[in-house]
Amino acid sequence: NAGVIQTPRHKVTGKGQEATLWCEPISGHSAVFWYRQTIVQGLEFLTYFRNQAPIDDSGMPKERFSAQMPNQSHSTLKIQSTQPQDSAVYLCASSLDGDTQYFGPGTRLLVL
Amino acid sequence: QQQVRQSPQSLTVWEGETAILNCSYEDSTFDYFPWYHQFPGESPALLIAIRPVSNKKEDGRFTIFFNKREKKFSLHIADSQPGDSATYFCAAKAGYQNFYFGKGTSLTVIP
């Protein structure tokens, strides 16, 4: 069991560029969660899929952030026109039962 | 409105003491309350969790105490070890909804 896989592990973008982050959940897990973690804000919920369907995206900044789960083996988080305040560690977690979450190693995004 | 509040922000205890970390919540429909720990450079990992049917859950040196009436739950780490030094997050969720996390407690255990 390789655990949750996130790529890339580090990404540096220039202000205004697009960033796409990938998550491969643990095989067989039906729920995928995306979070953003910063020192100041802590761990912030972004969005949640269950059986590939979007369940809750209440944490997503509406204008520039989007997430998809086109199949059960991967999910993507896309940030358009990145801003310095988007710099954070983006964490993906998957769950078999919706309760016990297994976090991936995260993608550290730096927007210059 | 912050759904889950966590205190203290930081805590220092001596090796062997019991560390107590506290959380409170707003939504009475929450039915799952996990605690995570996160070591520097790593991702959060589930430590222990409780459902409101119980007021206590133990796993080795880690115990959750749950008070439904006061909407509070706490993590007690008995016989604290330097290896327990980490950031601890409490969380809560209701049914198939998303998780709400506390801001975290940075625990330092001094040998």
Image (spheres, rainbow, N blue to C red):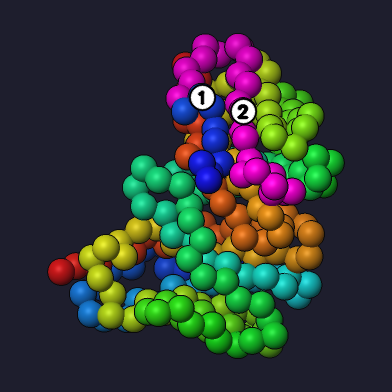
- Residue where numbered disc 2 is placed: A22
> Residue A90: x percent and y percent?
55, 36
Same chain assignment for discs 1 and 2: yes
> Does residue B104 appear anywhere in the picture?
no
Query: Callout 2: residue from which chain?
Result: A
As measured in the structure, the alpha-carbon distance from the residue carrying label 1 to the one carrying label 2 is 7 Å
10 Å neighbourhood of mark 2: few (<14), some, or many (≥20)?
A: many
Q: Is residue A27 above or below residue B87?
A: above
The three-letter amino acid code for the residue at tag 2 is: Trp
Task: Give the answer, above or below, for where A3 lies relative to B15.
Answer: above
Check disc 2 and report its element: helix, strand or loop.
Answer: strand
Q: Nearer the viewer, residue A4 or B104?
A: A4
The magenta stretch is A10-33
Where disc 1 sits, the SS reads loop
Q: Residue at x 19, y 67 (%)?
A: B110
Res. B29 image quadrant: bottom right
Q: What residue type is disc 1 on?
A: Pro
- Whether residue B94 sits left or right of residue A17 in the image: it is right
- The single residue placed furthest to the left in the displayed view is B111
> What residue do we see at 59% from left, 63% from top?
B91
Residue on which the image places disc 1: A8
Instruction: For the residues labelled 1 and 2, say whether their Cβ atoms are less than 8 Å apart.
Output: yes
Does residue A107 appear anywhere in the picture?
Answer: yes
- Residue at 78% x, 65% y is B95
Q: Is residue A29 magenta?
A: yes
> In the image, is residue B26 above or below residue A74?
below
Dot 1 crowding, Cα within 10 Å, few <14, some 14–19, many 20+: some
Q: Position of residue B16 (x, y in %)?
A: 23, 80
Closest to the observer, A78 or A44? A78
In magenta segment, residue B65: no
Q: Work out whether residue B38 or residue A99 is closer to the camera in this orientation and state it.
A: A99
Counting residues from the start of the chain, the first of labels 1 and 2 encountered is 1
